[in-house]
Amino acid sequence: MKKKIDSVHHSDAPVTATDSSDKSGRPLSDYAFTGLTLIIFATNETDSLVRTVTTFVEGCKKEDLSEIVIVYPDFVTDECLTTAEGLRDTYAAVPVTLLRQEKRGFGAGAKQALAGVTSSHVMMTDADWSHDFSVVPGMIEIVKVNPEAICKFSRRMTRDSFHNYSKVRYLFNSLAQVFLKALYGNRCTDMTDAGQIAPSKILKSIRWKEDGYAFLIELVLRPMRLGCRYIEVPADCYGRAQGVSRNSALCKIGYLKQALIIRATPPKKIAPSLFIKEQT
């Protein structure tokens, strides 16, 4: 099922139909959309993993979805691994591949998976059905027109987008939004949601630091520090309905420390081989 995107939000002035390069002068053809690789992190999920993979396979055009990579750690549950193997066999034509992490940690798995991406664009997500992924086909159409931009979820563009969130968790997120917007001076409405479709060339050029869950805030803020343009789409998000999250409140506090480190890092040190736009 596909969900129509009724509105979008640009963090910067859109590239017009007459533009042939981005603001740094790099040809837009460098980022031309050729396909999306979906990286899913699974540990103890079953039904939500099936729902995530099925939504992408059935909702996206066959030619748009290059590969689905299911990343799992050494402590994956037997039920989860069996489910992933079943999806690999069911959707072999996509293809769906399984990748066992060499090092522990969300960020370590993400970097390992990212190194093997060959498509033009990539998206990462947990297997816990954290978002309404029916908007992804529409996001793909957006990046086809804006291949150099990062198209991301925003839970803040519409009311009542947070489902099964505790008041404390919602309040913490609201305070983090205020802090990060002030720190980075960016017009994005959601500064903490890492659900996004991004050019692989940009992500693979970044020097990632975190092996744990703080990689999620890196995924948003390091490209932002480089000067990437963001296009946000409204998306509902959901508290975990299955499995056990290892992303604790203590981990999220670590996000703020990482945000300060990234803001103080010169863009050329973030991605020496792909410098986009210096910010001060």
Image (tube, grey):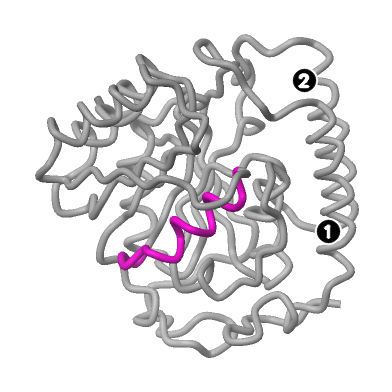
User: Main SS type for the magenta part?
Assistant: helix
Residue found at x 19% / y 31%: 58
Labels 1 and 2: the sequence-earlier one: 2
- What residue is at 26 percent from the left and 46 percent from the top? 97
Q: Amino acid at mark 1?
A: Gly
Range covered by the magenta-colored residues: 106-120
Magenta run includes residue 116: yes
Comparing labels 1 and 2, the label whose residue is closer to the camera: 2
55 sits left or right of 175 in the view: left
Q: x, y percentage for residue 259? A: 83, 54
Location of the N terminus (image quadrant): top left
Q: Secondary structure at mark 1?
A: loop
Residue at 77% over, 20% down: 170
Q: Which residue is mark 1?
A: 185
Residue 71, image quadrant: top left
* SS under mark 2: helix
x, y percentage for residue 217? Answer: 71, 48
Q: Compare residues 185 and 165 and report the one nearer the observer.
A: 165
The residue under label 2 is 170
- What amino acid type should be assigned to the residue bearing mark 2? Tyr
Name which quarter of the figure residue 60 lies in.
Answer: top left
Q: Quadrant of residue 96?
A: top left
Disc 2 packing (10 Å; few <14; some 14–19; many ≥20) = few
- Which quarter of the rendered picture does the C terminus lie within? bottom right
Marks 1 and 2, how far apart in space?
22 Å
Q: Around disc 1, counting alpha carbons within 10 Å, would you say few (fewer than 14), some (14 to 19), or many (20 or more)?
A: few
Residue at horizontal 66 percent and vertical 27 percent from the top: 246
In magenta segment, residue 12: no
Residue 183 visible in the snapshot: yes
